[in-house]
Image (cartoon, rainbow, N blue to C red):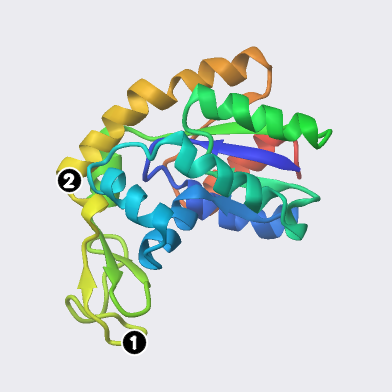
């Protein structure tokens, strides 16, 4: 199964990709995770990418495409993958199509997860991350037992720059102008399905599997 999950930041793509990973037995390939790892490790790509991420802007294609191509060439992705956060533009989708064509492969499905903007702002701006171990919390939905302290390691919790409310709203605007055309692009190929992204994660997973025709 070769699947793309689309949706605005905070729609739950990462959660669903991780759940589907075990169900479909193919790896999640999350461009955001790959980029954040590069930023944390202060690689040349990471230093460049951080400038864009901190401002809520899309990271330029040239900083993403090579990394994605390398990841899809790894052994665990040969039987399939779940792309989470990529592609984000029609240009990236066209490059992805070229990569798959050269491998004699094609996408089996594209799922767009939809969530209202105000719910997205609430979800993302409430996130807190542990500086020490990277564990994630939410001030409303999953608060730590002690304010600003990680339950797992006792590290300090902080709000990432790209989780601040103004940055989230900028990210949503970028999504609206740059990523929504992907829906039309994949709809023309007849592989797009739309799933409501509110509710319990298990409910959303069930909707996705039903949309894909998987029991």
Q: Report the disc number at residue 41.
A: none
Residue at screen point 37% across, 45% down = 10
Residue 23 image offset from top left, x and y in percent: 71, 56
N-terminal-most mark, 2 or 1: 1
Residue 37 image offset from top left, x and y in percent: 44, 63
Image quarter hosting the C terminus: top right
Residue at screen point 44% across, 51% down = 32
Q: On the rendered structure, is 63 left or right of 120? A: right
Could you give the CA–CA distance between mark 2 and mark 1, rounded to whole angstroms?
A: 27 Å
The tally of labels here is: 2
Q: On the rendered structure, is 162 left or right of 10? A: left
**Residue 152, relative to residue 138: is it above or below?**
below
Q: For mark 2, give the secondary structure.
A: helix
Q: Check whether the beta carbons of the residues at disc 2 and disc 1 lie within 8 A of each other.
A: no
Q: Residues within 10 Å of mark 2 (few under 14, many from 20)?
A: some
Label 2, on which residue?
165
Image quarter hosting the N terminus: top right
Residue at screen point 30% across, 41% down = 120
Evaluate whether residue 164 shows in this view.
Answer: yes
Q: Quadrant of residue 22?
A: bottom right
Please state which of residues 40 and 13 is positioned toward the viewer in this rendering.
40
Label 1, on which residue?
153
Residue 31 image offset from top left, x and y in percent: 50, 48
Q: Residue furthest bottom?
A: 153
Evaluate whether residue 201 shows in this view.
Answer: no
Q: Residue furthest right?
A: 104
Q: Residue furthest front?
A: 44
Q: Residues within 10 Å of mark 1 (few under 14, many from 20)?
A: few
Q: For mark 1, give the secondary structure.
A: loop
Residue at screen point 31% across, 52% down = 50
């Amino acid at each position: 199964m070769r699947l793309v999950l689309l949706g605005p930041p905070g729609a739950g793509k990462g959660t669903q990709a991780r759940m589907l990973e075990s169900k479909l037995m193919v790896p999640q390939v999350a461009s955001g995770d790959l980029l954040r790892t590069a930023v944390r490790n202060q690689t040349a790509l990471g230093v460049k990418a951080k400038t864009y991420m901190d401002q809520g802007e899309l990271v330029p294609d040239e900083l993403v495409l090579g990394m994605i191509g390398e990841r899809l060439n790894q052994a665990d992705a040969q039987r399939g993958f779940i792309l989470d956060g990529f592609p984000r533009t029609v240009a990236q989708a066209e490059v992805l199509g070229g990569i798959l064509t050269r491998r004699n492969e094609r996408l089996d499905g594209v799922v767009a997860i939809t969530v209202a903007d105000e719910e997205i702002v609430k979800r993302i701006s409430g996130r807190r991350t542990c500086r020490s171990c990277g564990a994630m919390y939410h001030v409303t939905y999953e608060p730590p037992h002690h304010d600003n302290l990680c339950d797992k390691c006792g590290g300090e919790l902080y709000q990432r720059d790209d989780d601040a409310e103004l940055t989230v709203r900028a990210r949503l605007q970028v999504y609206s102008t740059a990523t929504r055309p992907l829906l039309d692009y994949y709809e023309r190929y007849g592989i797009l399905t739309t799933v409501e992204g509110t509710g319990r994660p298990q409910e959303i997973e069930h909707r996705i599997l039903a949309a894909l025709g998987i029991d």
